Amino acid sequence: MSDSFEPLCDGSIRYHNDLPFRLESGAHPPDLTLVYETWGALNAKKSNAVLVHHALSVGAQARKQDQNPDFGW
């Protein structure tokens, strides 16, 4: 298995890749896990995507949604 996507109960999605990857620093972590949320739909030009980089906190929830009615940060 190399990568997987898992929908979570709060509406976010967990991505996991168990292959090593190379960072700019040259380090090679053994695997990668990301949790992300999406809202709306990507347009035909794919020009309406916004990446909100988020780190150093407990939760990744940026906004309220049906699966998780708590307000995000």
Image (spheres, rainbow, N blue to C red):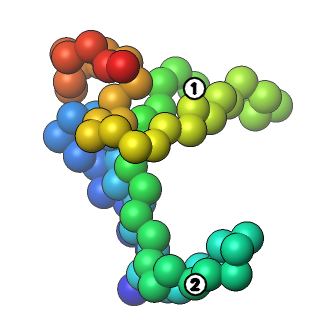
Q: Which residue is mark 2?
A: 28
Left or right? Give the position of 59 relative to 36. Answer: left
Q: Which residue is mark 1?
A: 41
Front position in the image: 4 or 73: 73
Is residue 44 visible in this depiction of the protein?
Answer: no
Residue 16: x, y in percent? Answer: 40, 67
Left or right? Give the position of 62 relative to 29. Answer: left
- Name the mark on residue 62: none
Residue at disc 1, secondary structure: loop
On screen, 33 above or below 66?
below
On screen, 69 above or below 41?
above
Quadrant of the image containing the C terminus: top left
Which residue is at 45% across, 43% downward?
55
Which residue is at 52% across, 21% downward?
40
Residue 29: x, y in percent? Answer: 50, 80
Residue 30: x, y in percent? Answer: 45, 85
Amino acid tagged 2: His
